[in-house]
Structure formats: C-alpha cells, structure tokens
C-alpha cells in the first residue's frame, strides 16, 4: 500500500488528478447546509477538492492541512479562479488555529480517519480532541460535515475494519447523522485507471482494475453531519 503521507507531501499533482475523477459532492454539502454567505473552516483541505467548489458561494474559507505542499496547490487553484476570500494554513486537526465561535461550517473530507483509525495509538483521544475543537470554533447553529471512505472497488458500503469504531463513535457517542453514497472514479481509459489506482491504492486493486477493465471504479463514501444547538 502506498505511503499516503508521502503522497500528500511529494506527489500532490498526481493526487489531485486522481480525486478530479470523482463527483464534486457539492449537492450533498448543500443539502445538509446551504453554503451561501457562510464562514467555513475546512480540515484536510488538500489540493482543493471541496475548497474550490465551495469558494464561489461562501463568505470566507480557512483551508487547513498537515501538508504545506498540497495547500500550495490548493491556493494556486483558488487564485487562478479569481478567489481572494480564503486563507491556507498548516495545522493539526486537534488544534484548529481559529477563535472560538468563528465558523458557520466545519467540513472535513477523508482526513480525520488518519487520526481516528484503530491502528493509531490514542485514537479515542484523537477523535475526542478533534470533535471538541470543531465544536469550539463553531458558532451557535453551526454545522459539521465529515466525509470518509466506505470502501473502494465495492458497490455497497464495506468500510475498513480499522475505521468501524470511529464511525460508530460519530453516530452513537457524538450524535452525528449518517448516510452513504457512491463516489465512483470515472477514468478516461484503462491505462489512466491502472496508473492512478496503483499510485494511491496499491497493486492489488490495480490488478483488479486491469483484470475487470474498470474504467469506472466503484467506490462508496459516508457522510456524517451534526448541527450545533
């Protein structure tokens, strides 16, 4: 399995190319919390898969990530699109660099999982710290939206075992609502499908892509959301 930390530091263009093959999910976000005029904090903003689609609608975005390199690509894309109402900053999800009650929406896509995985020492404490930080920076009536994987190469939800407890905590301990959706990758051809799948997901899935000629690679994602009182 490729080292994702290395990907986010040193292979950001290739990663951005991969996620561009998925739907934007703007409609899902808007259904949970309409974006018009909001102040947004985005955790794990990466190369801008959410930042760039939200930017035309919101008042301001603070885009945070552990990687300065991937944030640089995000900022470049935002500037190219003519946006100036944003700030990018390297940060840890457990210590959000924002004042209390400063955001209407905190959104995190495929990122808290790296702290909430059962393979990580102290993951229960990590999840609690991230939750408390998100609630701290939210204004009254603010919202949290979290996207995470429910399995790649599958047509029905099949989350990794090491994330199941994290997902259960979101729903049962912290009171998040939840639904799942398809987030299939739509590649131009089988060569692109194999290259990008191998790059991020590893050899086993890439072999399946070639064997089954999966120009459309199925994937499931979950969305969890909570509205602050």
Image (spheres, grey):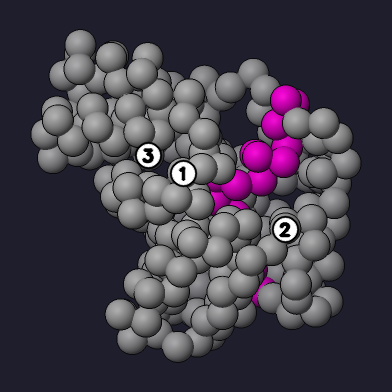
Q: Give the crowd class for mark 2: few <14, some 14-19, many >=20 residues within 10 Å.
A: some
Give the spatial CA distance, label 1 vs label 3: 21 Å
Residue displayed at 69% across by 76% down? 103
Q: Looking at the picture, does residue 128 appear above or below residue 214?
A: below
106 or 85: which is nearer to us?
85
Of the two numbered discs 2 and 3 in the rendering, the one whose residue sits closer to the viewer: 2
**Residue 161 visible to the viewer:** yes
Q: On the image, numbered disc 3 is attached to which residue?
A: 183
Q: On the image, numbered disc 2 is attached to which residue?
A: 92
**The magenta stretch spans residue 110:** yes
Who comes first in sequence, dot 2 or dot 3?
2
Give the spatial CA distance, label 2 vs label 3: 26 Å
Residue displayed at 58% across by 22% down? 160
What residue occupies the far left of the structure in this picture? 189
Q: Looking at the picture, does residue 2 appear above or below residue 125?
A: above
Range shown magenta:
104-119
Q: Quadrant of residue 94?
A: bottom right
Give the spatial CA distance, label 2 vs label 1: 18 Å
Answer with left or right where residue 58 lies relative to residue 44.
Answer: left
Q: Quadrant of the C terminus?
A: bottom right
Answer with left or right where residue 186 lies relative to residue 190.
Answer: right
Of the two numbered discs 2 and 1 in the rendering, the one whose residue sits closer to the viewer: 1
Residue displayed at 29% across by 36% down? 196
Tag 2 and tag 3, C-beta contact below 8 Å: no
Q: Secondary structure at mark 2?
A: loop
Which mark, residue 7?
A: 1
Q: Looking at the picture, does residue 176 appear above or below residue 43?
A: above
Q: Secondary structure at mark 3?
A: loop
19 or 11: which is nearer to us?
11
Image coordinates for residue 76, horizontal then vertical, percent: 38, 74
What residue occupies the far top of the structure in this picture? 211
Which mark, residue 38?
A: none
């Amino acid at each position: 399995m490729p080292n994702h930390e290395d990907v986010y530091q040193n292979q950001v263009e290739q990663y951005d190319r991969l996620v561009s093959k998925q739907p934007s999910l703007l409609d899902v976000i808007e259904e949970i919390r309409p974006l018009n005029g909001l102040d947004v904090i985005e955790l794990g903003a990466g190369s801008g898969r959410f930042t760039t689609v939200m930017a035309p609608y919101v008042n301001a975005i603070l885009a945070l990530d552990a990687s300065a390199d991937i944030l640089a690509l995000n900022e470049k894309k935002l500037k190219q699109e003519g946006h100036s109402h944003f700030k990018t900053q390297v940060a840890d999800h457990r210590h959000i660099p924002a004042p209390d009650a400063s955001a209407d929406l905190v959104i995190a896509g495929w990122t808290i999982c790296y702290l909430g995985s059962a393979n990580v020492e102290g993951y229960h404490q990590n999840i609690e710290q991230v939750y408390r930080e998100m609630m701290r920076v939210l204004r009254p009536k603010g919202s949290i939206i979290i996207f995470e994987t429910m399995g790649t190469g599958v047509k029905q939800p099949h989350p990794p075992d090491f994330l199941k407890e994290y997902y259960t905590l979101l729903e049962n301990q912290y009171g998040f609502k939840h639904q799942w959706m398809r987030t299939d990758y739509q590649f131009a051809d089988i060569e692109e499908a194999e290259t990008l799948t191998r790059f991020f997901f590893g050899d086993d899935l890439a072999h399946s892509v070639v064997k089954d000629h999966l120009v459309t690679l199925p994937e499931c994602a979950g969305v969890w959301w909570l509205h602050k009182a």
